[in-house]
Amino acid sequence: MSDSLVGAAAAQVAPAHADPIHSQGTVAVADPQLVRLLTPEGERLDHPEYSRYAADLTDADLRGFYRDLVLVRRIDVEATALQRQGELGIWASLLGQEAAQIGSGRAMQPQDFVFPTYREHGVAWTRGVDPIRLLGLFRGVDQGGWDPTEHNFHLYTIVIGAQTLHATGYAMGIQRDGAVGQGPDGDQGTAVVAYFGDGATSQGDVNESFVWASVFNAPVVFFCQNNQWAISEPLARQSRIPLYQRAQGFGFPGVRVDGNDVLACYAVTRAALATARAGGGPTLIEAYTYRMGAHTTSDDPTRYRIAADLEAWRLKDPIERVKAYLARSGIADSAYFAEIDAESDTLAADLRAQCLAMPDPAPLALFDHVYVDQTALLGEERTAYAAYLDSFEPAGHGGKGR
Amino acid sequence: MGQTTLAKAINMGLRTAMEDDPKVLVMGEDVGRLGGVFRVTDGLQKDFGEDRVIDTPLAESGIIGTAVGLALRGYRPVCEIQFDGFVFPGFDQIVSQVAKMHYRSLGKVRVPIVIRIPFGGGIGAVEHHSESPEALFAHTPGLKVVACSNALDGYAMIQQAIASDDPYIFLEPKRRYWEKAEIPDGFSVGAADPLHSARVLRPGRDVSVFAYGPMVRTAIQAAAVAEGEGRSVEVVDLRSISPLDLPVITGSVARTGRAVTLHEAPVSFGVGAELAARITEACFYSLEAPVLRVGGFDVPYPPARLEEEYLPDLDRVLDAIDRVASY
Ligand SMILES: Cc1ncc(C[n+]2csc(CCOP(=O)(O)OP(=O)(O)O)c2C)c(N)n1
Ligand SMILES: [Mg+2]
């Protein structure tokens, strides 16, 4: 690109956030600073707006965050290993994004509903989805093995951005059910969280979901994990302004949070959910983080990014800072950490065993669930294929080959 | 050039087209620095610069829509859609804009865009990465739809599609990307078969099998097995789906009297259905049996561990050959 083009574009996007827009909600952010409650060194910080959303966390809650973070990282490591050993076809690692997912996930209420991408294993954990259910998609035995309505956690969506519209529509349904603004302080309403990545912000669907959520004041929180990369493309390929500032143009507040700070992610999401629950409309949260691993196990990031960036982000590790804080403040000791390590090993061994034991679907499962009401034609196709398989005597089903 | 993979051959074809015509651009997600997730555009950005090899924002409607604008300005964009299942956010631009621009402008405006799509299954991928959407595009007047099956064709056909002033859907059989074929030294696109010609790959007397893209290899294997069982099977690589090369297709059936169509896409309302209708119309008096269609079942593309069941394989092709031959 020629310099003149760059210059012109840069001039147009000079920071213009002097006037924060503040819709009906409580969250208004024009501050380009990250919201942060815990430094990379593990020191608690005060934030004028958000500290109060983390103020009632008990020591047990804080230890719980640590446990969540360690366990989901362990699940992720195990899944990566399973892929390397050929047990999964592919895996999308959440390494580095644990705090963004655990913080936001733990901020939700049971009645809230989540629309994830393909990387939200940590959020799934907070919604009580058994980790083995996540592996089915990646092993190739199903396309999402959990019941979305049981956990209020929708299926993974691989088509980038599509789920943000589903989330918005779901939120519109909540409005029509009169399930917003309930309870004495409007704090018992229901809200939706839509997850997506930095790359996804370029998609039409995501931008349309912003429009819809805004004009209908839908109770949805847009939770963008800006991990700086969309496969090989850096954020600069998607945006010339900080992503959270996009919200302003759509008419709702945006906030950037330290995505490696579980407390800040918790507080900011809780605040945005409170706004949505009470009828205050959508918020865009940009969780500023880093994809520490490859895009997926099929990707080779050494082709497009430098190791120095990775090293810098390693110092901001989301787990280390919590551990340092817990240890320093006496909320947890080395015995606790050892206990969690042991638990994570057991969890991983369990996950591995269950993965290896996962049965392949039966051949005729091909024809299941295409329609609510099976058509006669598809029924015939199924019957014909069953007969065809039976023709391979004596092996029967699955015993093909001439 | 020697033994070359299909992926490398298309890469070389793109390179040649870019060298020949400075208006040729390559655009898509991860096509620049990374060289595409299948490395088909490997090295092109390094050699032709970021102005000509564009890592686009993550938005397929944007990729196709801006390609239209670039084409209107005299460029020849080659768009990469990362996987078949991700063409749909750009579907509106393709069907409503790209396909109709020449028609609506009474021929005053041309949009010479090539939309490359790695298509088909067989690589054990997760959902949306293994689909065969060719019929949707072939059903859209104004688009030309071609599918290469081997490296030599990949090299030539991509150049021919880029050189054409019509918009193209260029389908690349992703599971064949790493299969090699000989590209003779000094081979130039001028010596290639016309883009919309079908090719009889293996002559036969008893049954004609029509395939394209990933299924061509399967058809050839089936013909070899059938020969051992005393059946002479003719294999035709369609190469062009829209338009169809009817003289070659009907000529084959006129000789054999029996036809099997083969693709990964679901059978119903697919390319095979069109072939069956055309063959029936043109070869009614030569036909010894109904045209049989072999393809994917009429279900969404299944999880990877079921794809061997879903995809037509050697046995299913042989079964159809048996049935059509013993009719
Ligand atoms: C519509 C669509 N186009 C392309 C892809 C291929 N693809 C998968 S992930 C990805 C990058 C996504 O980046 P981002 O939104 O930042 O999420 P991240 O993977 O970093 O979590 C792309 C291009 C897709 N899944 N869907
Ligand atoms: Mg990203």
Image (cartoon, rainbow, N blue to C red):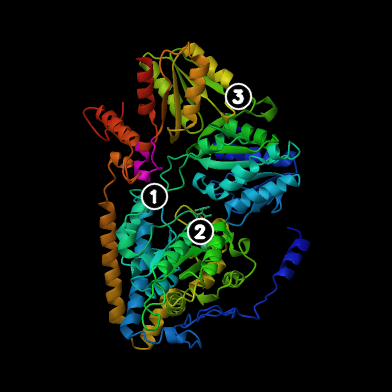
Q: Is residue B117 visible?
A: yes
Quarter of the image where the N terminus of chain A is located? bottom right
Q: Is residue B304 magenta?
A: yes
Please state the horizontal and vertical placement of residue A171, each as a whole percent of the image: 44, 66
Q: Is residue B273 above or below residue B327?
A: below
Residue sitting nearer the eye, A361 or A387: A387
Instruction: Say which residue appears at 43% left-offset and 69% top-offset.
Output: A175
Q: Is residue A226 visible?
A: no
Please state the horizontal and vertical placement of residue A197, each as a whole percent of the image: 51, 63
Callout 3 amino acid: Ser
With B94 as the anchor, is A136 left or right in this view?
left
Quarter of the image where the C terminus of chain A is located? top left
Describe the element under mark 3 as helix, strand or loop.
Answer: loop
* Location of residue B114 (image quadrant): top right
The residue labelled by disc 2 is A161
Residue sitting nearer the eye, B107 or A286: B107
Q: Is residue B200 above or below residue B108?
A: above
Q: Is residue B118 above or below residue A84?
A: above
Q: Is residue A348 magenta?
A: no
Residue sitting nearer the eye, A240 or B30: A240
Instruction: Say which residue appears at 48% left-offset and 69% top-offset.
Output: A218
Instruction: Tell me if the residue at label 2 has its CB under 8 Å from ligand 1.
Output: yes
Q: What distance separates the C-alpha of mark 3 from that of mark 2?
A: 40 Å
Circle 1 chain: A
The residue labelled by disc 1 is A89
Q: What distance separates the C-alpha of mark 1 from that of mark 3?
A: 38 Å
**Start-end of magenta stretch:** B297-309
